[in-house]
Image (spheres, rainbow, N blue to C red):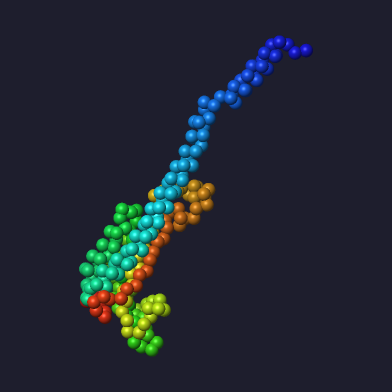
Amino acid sequence: MMRAGAHLETAGIWSKTVGFWCNHRGVAAVEFALIVPILLILYFMTMEASQAIETSKKVSRIGSMVADLVTQQPTIVKADLDAIMQIGTSTIQPYNRSTPNITITAIQVTTDTPPKVLVAWSRKVANGVNSVGAAAGSAATVPTTLNVAGTFLIRVDSTLGYQPIISWTADTQQKLGLTAALANGISMGETYYLRPRRSLTIPCSDC
């Protein structure tokens, strides 16, 4: 036979249980705590993706702009090439977590049969340091459509190791399934060809 006290105790537990499930005052706080991290992740990922796309476009623009400036010169010297590459580097701003590497290569397609594709001169900037690119007279390659005997080409290679805003720890990379290239840097690059505008060739006297 159940005592009255037991009835009261059971009723009290039931009342507390019902009250707990019916109390909605903390629901909003719990939902907020669960949703905010997801919203923040989506925000930062969207921001990162948009900046990466914009930076990639700028890397492509470097090639066209540098090639255009070089091909407007009838002759050129190392100082001019270095200044033009500096202009190309500045176009990547305001992105500043890594610097682009730029290589300008003058290519002569000979009149031999079959024609040879040779480097006339080359200049590059890598990690902010200017130096000679490919050796003069060394073999080069061009697309089939540009392999025309007796022509002169300027090729600009622009590359950038894009560093994301968000850095991931090794443990987080493993949990999210991120590759090292995606988490620590994304390789971007473009190659652009252009012919001289004001002369048949563009000699560099001190390259």
Q: Tell me where residue 48 appears, x and y as whole percent.
A: 41, 50
Is residue 115 left or right of 180 when viewed as pictured? left
The residue sitting at 23% across, 77% down in the picture is 198
Quadrant where the C terminus sits is bottom left
Q: Quadrant of the N terminus?
A: top right
- The outermost residue toward the top is 4
Q: Is residue 3 above or below residue 114?
A: above
Residue ranking furthest to the right: 1
Residue found 40% across the figure and 49% down from its top: 47
User: Can residue 170 be seen by looking at this rendering?
Assistant: yes
Residue shown at 35% from the left, 84% from the top: 149
Give the total number of marks visible in the rendering: 0
Question: Residue 121 location in percent, x, y?
Answer: 29, 76
Q: Is residue 101 visible in this depiction of the protein?
A: no
Q: On screen, 86 above or below 175?
A: below
Name the spot of residue 141 as percent of width and height, x first: 39, 77
Q: Quadrant of residue 181?
A: bottom left
Q: Position of residue 133 (x, y in %)?
A: 31, 71
Q: Nearer the viewer, residue 2 or 125?
A: 2
In the image, is 9 to the left or to the right of 200? right
Seen in the image, is 101 located left or right of residue 31? left
Q: Indicate whether 119 appears above or below 28.
A: below
Residue at point 52% right, 26% down?
A: 25
Q: Quadrant of residue 160?
A: bottom left
* In the image, farthest residue toward the bottom: 113
